[in-house]
Amino acid sequence: MTLSELSLRNAKRQAADYLVYFVTIIMAAALLYAFNGLVFSGEIRELYSMMSSLPMAIVPASIVVVCIFGWLVSYAANFMLTRRSRELGTYILIGLENRQVARLFFLENLAVGGCALVLGLLIGNLLFQALRAMILALFEMPYVFSLAVSLPAAGLTLAYFLLIYLLALYKSRKRIREMKIYDLIYFDRQNEEAVIRTGRNRRRMFALSIVFGIVGTFLLMIGNLLLGIIGAGCVIFFLYGFFLTFASGVPAFFEKHPAGKYRGQNLLVFRTLTAKLGTMGMVMATISLLLTATLIALGTGLVFRGIFDGRAAEHACFDLYIGAGEKGRPVDQAYLDYIEGNIPVEQSLTYEVRLHENNGVRQYLDDCGIEYFYTYRQDPVIRYSDYAALRAVAGYPAAKMEPGQYLIHCIPYLSEPLEDFRQPITAGGRMLAPGGVYTEHLIQRYAADNGQGYILVVPDEAAAGCALLHHAYAAKTVRPVGEEQVEELFRISNRIAERERGDTYDSDDYDTVYASVYEEKTAAYMTALTVLPLYYLALALTMTAATILTIQQLGESRHYRRQFALLDKMGMDAGEMAKALRTQFAIYYAMPAVPPLLIGIPFILNLAKQPEPEIMVGLSSPAAIVAIALGVFFLVYAVYIGVAYISLKKNVLPER
Amino acid sequence: MLQVKNIEKYYGSKNNVTKALDRVSFDVEREEFIAIMGASGSGKTTLLNCISTIDTISAGDILLDGEKISELPAGELARFRRERLGFVFQDFNLLDTLTVEENIGLALSLNHADAAGVKGRVREIAGKLGITDILGKFPYQISGGQKQRAACARAMVAGQSLLLADEPTGALDSKASKNLLEIMTQMNRDLGATILMVTHDAYSASYAKRVLFLKDGRIFNELLRGERPRPAFYHEILDVLATLGGDISDVI
């Protein structure tokens, strides 16, 4: 039998043990290819001028992903080397040279990697189609299925894979070449000597790490940035401290509470876990960190998506909107001339936003403790006739207002408190009663918008006495305003700014120009630029973490099988055995997932509240974002847990 | 205490039946120490597996304290094993992840014994078997003889009435074997343990009060030690083995 035949046979025999690893490597190749496909896709680049910068986000993410998968492959190769050291040692014993055995191991892994790459490219092409469809949907462009393979993307994937594999295999090759027969044959015993260390310092560290974990979580929950950072530091200390000392801490705990040790399945469950953590505490802590990064990446992606969606929804309600920044200055004629010459308009309106002399509503919102962005305190006001025309331009149904009433139009975020606002206001010397609250998007965020967060709609004569805040222009166009046209309007805005203020800068004095199509495209571009790489990272991180946990778990099948065969002989109930396995399994997978929840949830909640809380509503509300992030996180994790549990249960529990 | 009545055990399919046990019958009295001897493939381990309910019998009856164990349902069988039987295996079968104390305590834990009293009971039996000083160690930190004594302690700690030993000295050197056999004798004599030991080693068998010889699935002969000294009994066993034919080199 030649060396390559031997290698092939070994690879086949190992396949069942490392199926999860193999599938993950296939998915790694698929992920890398799919995202490389985006980097090289001309179609995606042409969607929008700024999409040419998409590679700037994808390539760094790919580099991080290559590092993560590199670690996974290196870990798996090392794990396999440990498990097969006796076999490899036997080859040397019967006369093969170290060099040949190293080559055998190298070829075998390269064969696995090669197969994974080929399968990965096939699946990757489908995944690329899914990503393509998602991006085209973001830009509201039609999608046509295609199976065209991108050669540059395949080439880059091959390069990434070579990098991943060659580095990992070089390490194990070097190790085998330097190893003595004795080391190989007794490699698996080396761990046994150091399974469980029970020093007093370790036990103290265990107790201390738990204290740090509790304090860290508490600090994270407070929501203050500095305390949050200290809290995260505490939780990371807890992670490593806990996982590295668990193996000595738990026995110490049971030493003090011996009765608890022998209750139910405690003994089996915790001893199995301590033995496992005794050898893989560092890996477990790192996995926990990877999962934390996953959850944060998922949450951050959702927060970004929420921000861009929220902005687009709020800013894209008019085909074209121009708010004159500087007080009292009308909408500049330069805009109107350009629009008249270049943009066919179906319906337009030039109007004024005024300021009420009081700030009753603003004060009420402040008293409610609601956080949202505003730069002036007085209540903004609009004439009912302008408001009615504005609704028509936006395509909204008419809003009714009875004589002697006022309306509130606000962003959805403020609808709940403002619906409870029942106080009358005085305008133009007349008392007005509340007539209702409307919450359609109306551009209500910055100084030159239709109010900040809300605007009061009052009868025309009542508005006459209010001071002018700014002029504005809104239009419904015959065709969507093009990218070029919006850019020209931006240029006009900049020229006005230079003319009016020279070098002094005040963002509140700038004109604002919003065009619906442009806003939507910008949101789509920003989403693609931030969310895709973050999800790409999140997926790679979870897959890597879950794969390592699963390899470890399934790699212990033989040990578990022996254990349960003995327990069966000793008369343990089948139900109790299944329960012990389930508990062991659940704790094993839950342990590295708990710290990410402790760090991730407060982090995401705070992040979602921080930058622009007023647009984070509905599916983008902080609670919804946490729920969705957890859902996605556990969905991927659960697939691995399910596969591992079914496989382990089948292989481990005695048959009846 | 234990009655084995005409048990038969077949393996294989219709066209290729192997008879592992062929109408085997014997009784074991309380506090007896019986050895079952025979060459490889004679059916010793099959017999032990059938008595321990790990394997099922094809015909016949096995009664423990008058109870037909061959008719117990699966759930009852598990209970029967953990409450009534103790096992000692050739390869020790201690769990690597548990200390010696925990390995012994496991038998009590499986029996849902009062958790608070486990430690005391483990210490008590460990004291009798001379392994108190290794209770805190893991199996890979102790010698084969110590492992086997720990296994004996586990087999008795929950008050099991019948100790089944399958080649208990098979993985031990001669000194450790002698030590273990003396411990087992002590367990039988002082602690009242009923022991059924399968072995193909005549020296080990000579520690028993009675030896059953199996050949091709049948009981071929039976020797009672009576009041004879152990070395004389040992020679008598060797004589029987010689008549079993051809297997002498296997059994010494």
Image (spheres, rainbow, N blue to C red):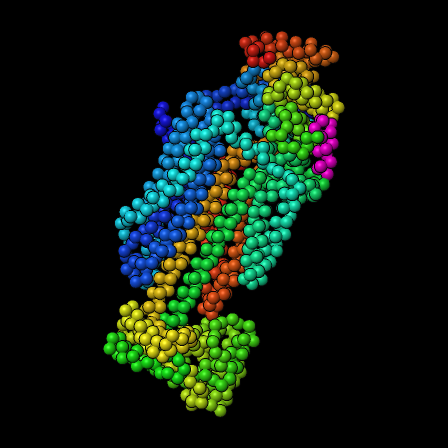
- Boundaries of the magenta span: B117-132
Residue placed at 41% from the left, 82% from the top?
Answer: A327
Residue placed at 54% from the left, 46% from the top?
Answer: A285
Which residue occupies the extreme right position in the image? Answer: B190
Where is residue A155 shown, x and y percent of the image? Answer: 30, 45
Q: Is residue A432 left or right of residue B132?
A: left
Q: Is residue A271 left or right of residue A70?
A: right
Residue B102 seen in this snapshot: yes
Residue placed at 37% from the left, 56% from the top?
Answer: A57
- Quarter assignment of residue A222: bottom right
Q: Is residue B121 magenta?
A: yes
Which residue occupies the extreme front position in the image? Answer: A503
Where is residue A33 shown, x and y percent of the image? Answer: 34, 48
Nearer to the camera, A313 or A392: A313
- Quarter assignment of residue A16: top left
Residue placed at 72% from the left, 26% from the top?
Answer: B130
Residue A191 in the image: above or below residue A479: above
Residue A626 in the image: above or below residue A267: below
